[in-house]
Image (cartoon, grey):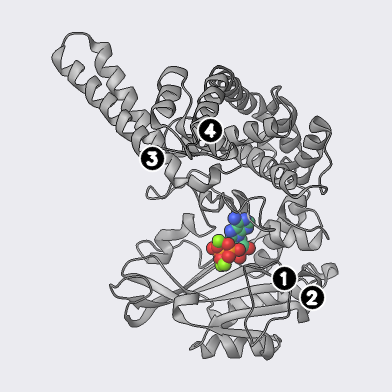
Amino acid sequence: MRSAEIATRWNDYFAKQGHHIAPSTSLVSPDPSLLFTVAGMVPFIPYIIGTEQSPHPRIASVQKCIRTKDIEEVGKTTRHGTFFQMLGNFSFGDYFKEGAINFAWELLTSPESEGGYGFEPERFWVTIWNEDDEALSSLVNAGVNPDQIVKLTREEIFWDTGQPGPAGPCAEWHYDRGPEYGPDAVGGTVDPGGDRYLEIWNLVFDQYLRGPGDGKNYELIRELDQKAIDTGAGLERIAFLKQGVENFYETDEVFPVIGEVQRLTGLTYGEDKDADVRFRVIADHIRSSLMLIGDGVKPGNEGRGYVLRRLLRRTVRNMRLMGVDDAALPALLPVSKDAMKLTYPELDADFSRISEVAYKEEDVFRRTLASGTTIFDTAVAKAKDAGAKALPGADAFQLHDTYGFPIDITLEMASEAGLQVDEAKFRELMNEQRERARADAKAKKGGHADTAVYAGLLEQRSTEFKGYHELVTATEV
Ligand code: ATP
Ligand code: MG
Ligand code: MG
Ligand code: MG
């Protein structure tokens, strides 16, 4: 079952159940407090928190998502992408727990010939809140084996927005991939982080009005007047189970890039653990970059643009580490586009613009690498000769200042060389430089306008540094 068909089946099923099918919104979040659309519910936040009334009581969608938070998992777990598609169904004051549970069960387990996904019913384990009797009885009535319903605490299974407003328990569906992927669930607990029990679908029941409090330590004041259902299932997770492959990265919309990387590097996927992580990171990042540029994001030093820049640079760096020094994107990006265009035909029409943005960024980065690498190597050799564990901050600063070598790349390359970087010193030098630029600008007061512009540029660079921290471990390619 191809990924595109998983999406179609989803929409067809929920349309039949009276849902309005909403098109995916952009990856650039419509909610100004978020950089990206991180879940299917994002476009519907006003309906969930109750500040607006939905024109449709039932909605379903297949939403493009980006989760930069998961970047460090990519390639290492079986199930995380930076870009993925979240299948969702939503009810605003319409059906509640029983309805949502029945839909999930029916769609997952009814035969493919009847429009379902055709999973074996015995495979499912569901985690619920230990006080949620309504979810429990609905699950049992639907046909879930009571021994495979796992009760968790409020800490473990509650959803909320982090502030007073709607909150509620979830029911999460896990698919048992079988004993070859790990030990049996012991004492009625599943290990959703392991390879065996794969989380595929989260049903969130927006049931309560919560008060203030830290973490999950808040009062449930009362039941909401208008309860809501917000669900999210990972399309690629269903795809990897249905396609009989081992993970997210081997599905039909991602794997073709791995194939192309094999061709370019002459290496074979599946032979070496470290190389496999690189194959998967490249395939993931190429796809995320394609989709981000498709939605209008441009590489830059801040915010969304910085995330895109990191994804593209990590791709280039990983290709280099696999022995490819030539420009790689002109080979990889079209392959990703062809794998995605069945679902997103607009990528084809827009590809000359998209590819121009990506290829230009690769060119700039390759030039930066070329100019800085020799200096970097000399600095590393010197630090090692001196028996130091860290590259001096002054070297990192010089690489940044003179050669345009971003600190994140220095950190990444130093880590590969077995060294840390004296980041505190680097930051201190950056600050001093900024102060100097400010003082200069002031001294020239209204004189040469360029100085002020320069100070502005330095500010931007310092945000780049902050941005790195957001993605910090992501850089350990
Ligand atoms: P996990 O525990 O596996 O990280 P999650 O609990 O963070 O997943 P939810 O926020 O519950 O995920 O999102 C709903 C569904 O979206 C998940 O059940 C999963 O199927 C899918 N999903 C979440 N994050 C990713 C990702 N990074 N890549 C692919 N699918 C994802
Ligand atoms: Mg997660
Ligand atoms: Mg989870
Ligand atoms: Mg979850």
Label 4: which residue?
Answer: 384
Numbered tag placed on residue 179 in the rendering: 2
Q: CA distance from mark 3 to mark 1?
A: 37 Å
Spot occupied by residue 77 in the image (x, y as percentages of width and height): 66, 57
Q: Quadrant of residue 423?
A: top left
Q: Secondary structure at mark 4?
A: helix
Q: Are marks 2 and 1 in contact (CB under 8 Å)?
A: yes
Pointer 3 with pointer 1, Cβ within 8 A: no
Give the amino acid type for the residue marked by disc 3 in the picture. Answer: Lys
Label 2 vs 3, first from the N-terminus: 2
| Residue that carries the numbered disc 1 in the rendered image | 196
Can you say which quadrant of the picture contains the C terminus?
top right
Q: Is 295 situated above or below 247? A: above
Near-viewer residue (318 or 163): 318
> 449 or 465: which is nearer to us?
465
Report the Cα–Cα distance between label 2 and label 3.
43 Å
Q: Quadrant of residue 232?
A: bottom right
Residues at discs 4 and 2 in contact (Cβ within 8 Å): no
Label 4 crowd bin: few (<14), some (14–19), many (20+), radius 10 Å: some
Q: Secondary structure at mark 1?
A: loop
Q: Earlier in the sequence, mark 3 or mark 4?
A: 4
Q: Residue at x 37, y 50 (%)?
A: 33
Q: Which mark is residue 466?
A: 3
Residue 127 circle label: none
Tell me which label, 4 or 1, sits earlier in the chain: 1
Do the residues under discs 3 and 4 have CB atoms within 8 angstroms? Answer: no
Q: CA distance from mark 2 to mark 1?
A: 7 Å
